[in-house]
Amino acid sequence: MQNIQGDAASIKPIKSDNSQPTGDGVKGWTVDAGTWLWSLGNKDAEFIGVHIALALAVNLTSLVVDVCNLPEADIKSLVVGDWIPWNPTTVFVAKDGADMAVAALTISKPAATALGGAYFDLQSNSRRLRLRGVVAVGGLVRVATHGKD
């Protein structure tokens, strides 16, 4: 297997309304309340490990993986059918932090009283993958990936 490294310390998200996060990405990006999207797509990687770190202040309503084979579908699209939520019931998600909650592949941090993190492995034949996070209270979020083919 060949290693396919993520190309940045933290994947830069984009908000569904096209807003940009603040920061330099070294320790993550600062996001505000709303729907944020992180592109995980790596057509060269059959296996992708996803690591998420959340600052104390972040209140995350939900974080889900979406898949897409439509090349024209915009990463920011929230149109039903463009991106399909992928929530297998047998996936293992490692979590760290008192506020973290996991149900299948839906991750949340409903309170803002502790740091939080999660890690999971993905194997998908989809052309593109993204994380879709609904943030209630913003703060520093770091998403990093590593893949193998």
Image (cartoon, grey):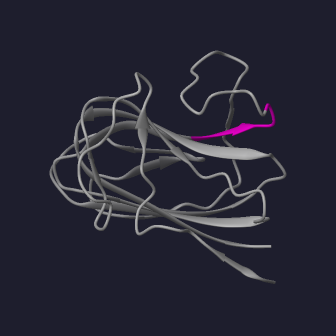
Reply above or below: 73 against 86. Answer: above
**Residue at position x 77%, y 83% in the image:** 2
**Residue at position x 22%, y 39% in the image:** 138
View extreme (top): residue: 79
Q: Quadrant of residue 116?
A: bottom left
Percent from the top left, x then y, of residue 7? Answer: 53, 68
Percent from the top left, x then y, of residue 12? Answer: 42, 51
Reply above or below: 125 against 26. Answer: above
Q: Magenta span: helix, strand or loop, mainly?
A: strand
Reply above or below: 88 against 91. Answer: above
| Residue in front for this viewpoint, 145 or 90 | 145
Q: Looking at the figure, which quarter contains the N terminus?
A: bottom right
Percent from the top left, x then y, of residue 92? Answer: 61, 61
- Residue 88 visible within the image: no
Specify whether residue 69 is painted magenta.
yes
Span of residues in magenta = 65-70
